[in-house]
Amino acid sequence: MSSSFIPKFRRAAAVLCCAVMAMFQSSAQAEQGERVETSARSAILIEKETGRVLLHANCREKLPMASTTKVMTALMALEKGQLDDVVTVGRNAYGVPGTSIYLSLGERITLRDLLYGLMLASGNDAAVAIAEHIGGDVEAFCQMMNDRAAELGCTDTCFLTPHGLPASGHYTTAYDLALIASEAMKHELFREMVSTKRASIPWEGRSYSRILHNKNKLLSTYEGATGIKTGYTRAAGRCLVFGAKRDGLEVIGVVLNCGSWFEEAARLMDLAYERYCSFTALDAGEMVRVLPVKNGTQETVVIAAGERLCGPIPKDAVPVLEYDLPDEIAVGVSQGDPIGRASMLLNGEVLATIPLVVSETLAKRDYAFELEQVIVNWPLHVQSMAE
């Protein structure tokens, strides 16, 4: 087998792998939320914490996504790499077509700085440099991207490049891309990068730095905007992953093949904020119930919320809170152990669920405890007999 054939063979294998995964993972889940009219070929808006779909339009269609691919590239770098790692730019990263941060062959640059070049300036050369540093080569890195996407529940996604330049068989859906962006936004550095309008990073061999400008106009025009990533190729059209946070409600959206990308993203977010609010049913640590303890050194124990129970609801709705708890607690349970669940429901549909935990460790009655009880209560026992 010739060396020139190997990359083509690996790419064909990756396409086949994506197809097989799609066969075994159902995407027939009924959409939540409201179907809306949009100028985008495909669109979605979700609530970040719960992943609940608020608005959608054709959000399961497989489409090319251009440089919004780099959201997954950044996520893999944050999960698998060390930010202070020094990356040496190889021949494959040097001179990649399209948008670039103009890396030089053999240039040494930190992974952190490459990530800024990737997300602000959309450097295709930075994407390849990251891929080779993390995965060894681009093909192996793309397989890592696909594996991680599958873990996140992306059933209609196949990555063949780390940058999103046109490649047959490289696609995602608005729904899957929203899941990926939601996971990436859990990383503080990612949130910082995608909300930064302008930054500078070193330029080896020069007396001045690279100046990076974020192409996302929403950061300057939309109240509460949090990012996230633009993308464009002739085949994919204008693609945008975007987000905002207002009054405790954080949303993440995607529009694919949308000529008026920034305007349509703002319109969709406006719709969501007009119709939905964030509702908190329980705060983390809030007492839920007191349950009896069986054969323990104490009679009862407090049950508390293990984390905050919240979710998006229509502004005119009132959710229902349901608990799933045993009638009593057995000993041997440690503080913080989950022993049940609390769910917030609307019209019979579960919006969010959290674990309920015990507030303290429950010790078992033993000989030492029983003896101590006899000693403690002995004077009372003698007095009652005398009376």
Image (cartoon, rainbow, N blue to C red):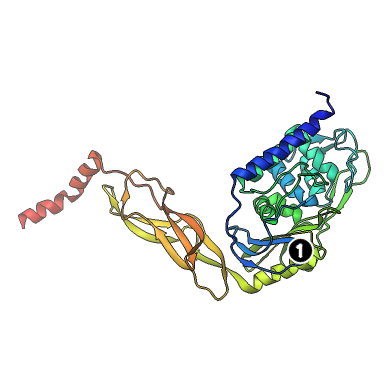
Q: For the view shown, which residue lies furthest in the bottom direction?
A: 316
Residue 133 in sight in this render: no
- Which quadrant: the C terminus? bottom left
How far from the left and from the top, in percent, is residue 64?
77, 51
Query: Looking at the picture, does residue 139 appear above or below residue 63?
Result: above
Horizontal placement of 167 versus 57: left or right?
A: right
Q: Residue at coordinates 46% horizontally, 60% vertically from top-left? A: 343
Residue 198 in sight in this render: yes
Q: For the view shown, which residue lies furthest in the top direction?
A: 1
Q: Residue at coordinates 80% horizontally, 60% vertically from top-left? A: 216
Numbered label tally = 1
The type of residue carrying mark 1 is Ala
**Of residues 190 and 365, which is closer to you in this image?**
190
**Of residues 373 and 45, which is closer to you in this image?**
45
How far from the left and from the top, in percent, is residue 63?
75, 53
Horizontal placement of 195 versus 314: left or right?
A: right
How far from the left and from the top, in percent, is residue 124?
84, 45
Q: For the view shown, which residue lies furthest in the left direction?
A: 386
Horizontal placement of 379 versus 187: left or right?
A: left
Q: Quadrant of residue 301?
A: bottom left
Q: For the view shown, which residue lies furthest in the front direction?
A: 23
| Label 1: how many Cα within 10 Å (few below 14, some 14–19, many 20+) | many
Q: Quadrant of residue 249?
A: bottom right
**Of residues 41 and 135, which is closer to you in this image?**
41
Q: Quadrant of residue 278?
A: bottom right
How far from the left and from the top, in percent, is residue 245?
67, 64
Residue that badge 1 annotates: 40
Under tag 1, what secondary structure?
Answer: loop
